Amino acid sequence: MQQVQYTGFFYNCRINETRLNNCFNVYLEGVKRVDVDFHIELLPTGGYGVDFSQPSEDVSAGVSLVAKKILEHGVTSFCPTLVTSPPAVYHKVLPQIKVQNGGRHGAGVLGFHLEGPFISAEKKGAHPQQYLRTFQSGGLRDLMEAYGSLNNVSMVTLAPELAYSQSVVRELCQRGITVSLGHSVANLSQAEEAVQHGASFITHLFNAMLPFHHRDPGIVGLLTSDQIPAGRTVYYGMIADGIHTNPAALRIAHRAHPSGLVLVTDAITAMGLPPGHHTLGQQVIEIQGLHAYVAGTKTLSGSIATMDMCVRHFKQASGCSVEEALEAASLHPAQLLSISHKKGNLDYGSDADLVLLDDDLIVRATYISGEEVWRKGS
């Protein structure tokens, strides 16, 4: 490193300065410009041969492997995602993983995202229908029967049209758990009611939900709804891998509600592996080129994209600024999870989690708590 220009410094592993922009420039030898940012990933179901929804005696080893590998893609924190599974899987997997800070060992774990099993059979996507559930007893008891515990859970995706779902939304939000709407046939009024009870996220917008219709736009209509409570923001995940969402649809969403867009990979076991057959929970997945399908079908099943790939594609497809692209992978997910006081920005007192990116938004180095944990070529 020949020269570094910046306006803040690290103190006790936090940024110490009166104010820093979300993205600023430093200059490294041989590189014209490096943008500083960090990525938070909300929807990975696995990667590098690890499937978070497959129970084992040492689930933590698989999570640790993925946490280590995703450092090279600029991810400093993530939420491992479990897809629809039988109760025995949740009961075995969830107790083995705790919320923890990142470091040289890998990206930090922000808590589990539970995508299912309380979702629509009609919009189940790659989720196995035999394990889908409904709310039979009014809410909390159903959650506990399925999951066993809500400890170390940060987000739950559910379908708001299910009976008793609104009481479940309230219960989860009261426990500090983010509620996301997805895999659903909800109309706009059902989605708005869920938001009024505390839901704040849309799982992979446009995918596994009713398509936009001018008479009832469904969940998609939340992006411009006038029924969102004052002071609240509805965030929405976009799989910007060039496969799940047409660039025109991506641009429509971004221009309608830029401050709510959260980039997600929806990465599966096969991320980082060659084409072939892999698992996603209880399903067999086939990788053909860049596409992931439920084996023997043309049903898309997650993605093999990495977060830095999604950032680059989003910027190119949307025409947004570098700052907007980076905030969609950092500031917005931190705001969604109510951790923006310490992550998602470079403000005074924030965790010193940083990613150095070159002119082409290629990751050059990753830092957690001010410590370099990965560098390209080393």
Image: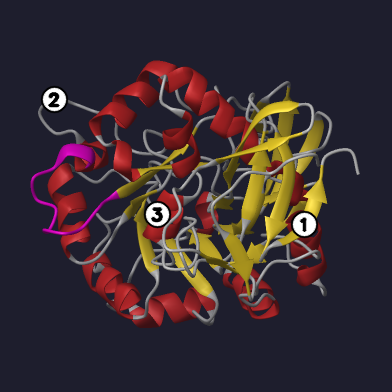
The three-letter amino acid code for the residue at tag 2 is His
Is 188 displayed left or right of 33 in the figure? left
The three-letter amino acid code for the residue at tag 1 is Glu
Task: Name the residue rendered at 58%, 25% in the picture.
Answer: 298
Q: Which label belongs to residue 372?
A: 1
Which is nearer the eye, 353 or 315? 353
Magenta-drawn stretch contains 240: no
Residue with the mark numbered 2: 214
Query: Mark 2 or 1 closer to N-term?
Result: 2
Query: Mark 1 or 3 closer to N-term?
Result: 3
Q: CA distance from mark 2 to mark 1?
A: 50 Å
Residue with the mark numbered 3: 119
Q: CA distance from mark 1 to mark 3?
A: 41 Å
Q: Secondary structure at mark 2?
A: loop
Q: Secondary structure at mark 1?
A: strand
Which is nearer the eye, 277 or 341? 341
In percent of width and height, residue 112 lies at 56, 66
